Image (tube, grey):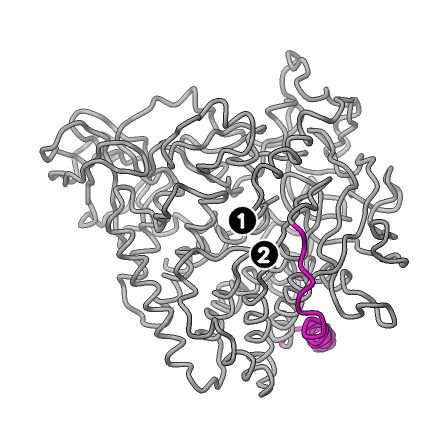
Amino acid sequence: MRLPALSRKARLAAIAAAIVAVPAVALPIALSGRHDEPPAPIRADTSAGPVDVGYTFPPTPDHIPDTPVRVNQVGYLPDGPKHATVISDSSEPLSWQLKDAGGKVVASGRSKPHGMDPSSGQNTQVVDFSKYHATGHGYTLEVDGKTSVPFDLDPKAYQQLSIDSLSFFYTQRSGIAISDEIAPGYGRRAGHTADTPNGGDTNVGCQPGVCDYRLNVTGGWYDAGDQGKYVVNGGISVAQLLSIYERSPKASQERALRIPERGGPIPDVLDEARWELDFLTKMQVPAGQPLAGMAHHKMHDAAWTALPMDPAADPQLRELHAPSTAATLNLAAAAAQGSRVFATYDRAYSAKLLEVAKTAYAAALEHPKMYAPDSDSTGGGAYGDTDVTDEFYWAAAELYITTGDKQYSDAVQASPLHKADVFARAFDWQNVAALGRLDLATVDNKLSDRDRVRQSVVDGANHLLKTMEGQAYGQAYAPEGGYDWASNSQMLNNLAVVATAFDITGKGKYRDGVLSGMDYILGRNALNQSYVTGYGEKASKNQHSRWYAHELDPKLPNPPRGTLAGGPNSQLQDEVASAALKDCKPQLCYMDDIQSWSTNELTINWNASLAWVSSFVADQA
């Protein structure tokens, strides 16, 4: 549930209600039909211990000895860059040794002092062992007598992550029972169907005063730790999944995911994307109604629910919220991209998506200033946005690439963003112009200034590489004023820009930049923390979620392998983090606690960024 950068105090009060203002009641949660008794409510006695849910939980941080030698805890590609960061008070170079699993020294050298790192407050040195190209498992790096956690040197180090980060979306599906055979330990009843306590999403009305019709808005993905469904966050998420396919169709065809459609004629990543695309099209205002063609901004519960909460047990009334220009243009962009991608596999569906996209774009032109308010945060995230210049640019770009029509190319070139530096900050659900720019640069089209567009991506990537070079931990992120909500996803989206520069130029420095940038996400950071569940010796596993709530009820699972945590957030909007981490340095503003929704939530758009980058890296093998 990513909330906007505005009205932080209002968000704090509203979201805190999800945790502290809702009565704790026994909530029936069924996983694969194996748990017949209702689990304990929030903060309940869990002395009975966990049951077998078919999942091996990663070790808790308490079991992992801390080390000042910070590495990518998953591994490095043998032919890629290999860097580590060492926390040390010394200002002199330190001796290092790379050891194989048997303890044999296979490489050695001296570190390079970096000095005080402002993002962590740590005095640091950097080790570069890139010249070692052998493969193997269980390597460790010893620096000045201190040893790192083990890691691998493996050309396939990211293959499984590219699968797991995409398979995450299956267990986020709404309106379908999740099969325990497909996702062991995560089976559950279908959520928000007609037979659930609140009547589900099959016949949903609007908030009072918004509309007098009802829509079937079943399907789609639950957005985050809550059970809302939001068009603006769904738009960027499905777009990045579609872009994984567009970037590498062959690799996508070969990448088998844990989904029911596996093995069918359509690549699995597109089957998963279709689950969300279908929902997005259902959010369009029907013909004959006021605001026909616009898209409802979101739909979710009328009031916040407590943790834990099985989607099938949700008692709250579901409501459609008012249409917005931002949501409508998200629908137009995602449907236009979906239309061209599905043209090879399902022409009828492709044509339907294109009609939806054109209708939505035309409706947005008629209603260009229907803004979603930042105050609408009861029962779900607000996702407010009062600047839709970027959404207009993105939608026009996707429609032009798909159709070649002059009206859309004219709109692209007339946009004030077309020649602006759209990579000056990381793109996210609220800043989507970069999505259009990246596709204009890489998907075949006849835009008159396409060479300049492609060069703008390379220029953006060069700036990001320069940023990375100045960071002790090599992250593609150095914002002023501290780290923002979802800093991990912002870093990954920056890496997507660098990766696209590699696709455009073929220059190895961009590939190496992406590989180095992933090190931070997987453990080479100030907290010695892998932010991806199931990956690394010390990995996040208590992300804020209503049904992956093992920390609150041991009968429930942790998030599935391949789930990204939001990451350090200097604003600390939740009460748990603000009490524990006051005055933290940016990189240290994180805690792996299910109640820390401002630093440790999971969301579909954050996992989409992880999936995109991990798929790129997996393709490098």
- Quarter of the rendering occupied by the C terminus: bottom left
Q: Is residue 506 magenta?
A: no
Cβ–Cβ below 8 Å for labels 2 and 1? Answer: yes
* In this rendering, position of residue 465 left or right of residue 23: left
Q: Residues within 10 Å of mark 1 (few under 14, many from 20)?
A: many
Q: Which mark is residue 237?
A: 2
Residue 322, percent across and down? 76, 56
Residue at position x 63%, y 60% in the image:
273
Any magenta on residue 354? yes
The dot on residue 6 is: none
Identify residue type, mark 1: Asn
Residue 90 in the image: state x and y as whole percent: 13, 29
Q: Which mark, residue 607?
A: 1
Please tell me which residue lies in front, 426 or 132: 426
Identity, as a three-letter code, of the amino acid under mark 2: Ser
How packed mark 2 is, by other alpha carbons closer than 10 Å (few <14, some 14-19, many 20 or more), is: many
Magenta residues span 344-373
The answer to whether residue 486 is left or right of residue 123 is right
Residue 222 vertical placement versus 234 (above, below): above
The residue under the point 32% across, 72% down is: 505
How would you classify the magenta stretch by its main secondary structure?
A: helix
Residue 600 position, x and y percent, is: 52, 35
